[in-house]
Amino acid sequence: MAGPLMRCVQIERPGGPEVLSIGEAPRPEAGPGEVLIRVEAAGMNHADLAQRAGKYPPPPDASPLLGLEAAGTVAAVGPGVQSLREGDRVCTLTHGGAYAEYVRAPAAHCLPFPAGCRAAEAAAVPEVAMTVWSNVWGHGRLAPGERLLVHGGASGIGSFAIQLAVARGHEVLATVGSPGKVAAVSRWGAKPIAYREEPFEDRVAALTDGRGVDVILDMVGGDYTPRNVRCLAMDGRLVQIAFLQGGSTTLNWMDVLRRRAVLTGSLLRPRSTQDKARIVAELQREVWPLYAAGTLPRPVVDRVFPFEQVRQAHEFMDSGAHIGKIVLEWCAA
């Protein structure tokens, strides 16, 4: 006998936003070490757009449904779960499936709502927080007194990286592409670089008196890579998390050698369950108290769309006009 069904976003075929629709799928069950979450809101990410277009197929062990981060209420707990109980409100990184009324996730990947946040704000945090923390402070080893450059400063990842770095006392530079985004990153405490008006490496040199930056967080790739290297201070680290302009480039390795530079990066989704749990534990210890203290501002959410308007939400994200995160929300029945 078939189990209960739930509403979810379905992809009719690879393509643009027009291929998305609301349909039904079997409701998942919480397995050992997992919880089942009744989804109130889901954060959107560029990975969702790539999966919709057929360019980012989910791993074999992942849900085929879209969505990597969700916020909601624990509806059921699986065997062995002691840290959470039914009724707890959590936000979480999922292995897919957050664009649905219910999603399952390892209990060790769940975090309480940040202090003062509603569901739409909490849903905007897990993926960006895990990505930024594990890359900027993990692989990038950003240390006290060091300077950070964030590309795509007005994006969801960019906004969180700026907010967290400023909250932890760092000087931050951020590239942006419009006057509205210049104003936004300035409000968050970063020094804006309008990359359409002048080469960003020239502006970095001017803002740092030629000393460069210690860590760069980049999701652009392509010809940004050699330009990024020229922005690095001695012993600087370039951390790559995506490559919107392509994964290939030409690099003068002498620029790397002269700076004793480190080029590194990572993907979040392929990490092991244990590795993700470690990052979540670090966030709860190092970052969540900053929300409670009011040192770290609430997440930047540009717009909240009802799930029924998922096509419009994807169109808006495709446009690149957003500042911060875009969130999908189930309307109250």
Image (spheres, grey):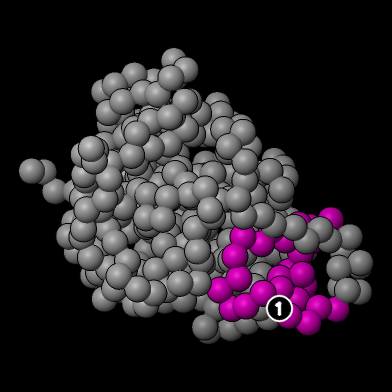
**Residue sitting at 35 percent across and 48 percent down?**
98
Task: Give the residue pinned by disc 1.
Answer: 248
Instruction: From the viewer's side, name the closer residue of 16 and 211.
Output: 16
Residue 245, picture quadrant: bottom right
In the foreground, 190 or 227: 227
**For the point 21% across and 44% down, which residue is it?**
5
Q: Quadrant of residue 256?
A: bottom right
Note whether residue 237 is visible.
yes
Is residue 62 placed above or below 206 in the rendered structure? above
Q: Tell me the quarter of the image containing the C terminus.
A: top left
Under circle 1, the secondary element is loop
Q: Position of residue 44 (x, y in %)?
A: 37, 57
Q: Residue at x 26, y 50 (%)?
A: 25
Which percent across, then down, holds residue 185? Answer: 45, 61
The magenta-colored residue range is 225-252
Residue occupying image coordinates x 75% and y 58%: 264
- The answer to if 329 sits in the magenta stretch is no
Answer with left or right where residue 91 lies relative to residue 250: left
Q: Is residue 327 above or below residue 3?
A: below
What amino acid does circle 1 point to? Ser
Can you give x and y, in whole percent of width and height, for residue 81 in the image?
A: 44, 19
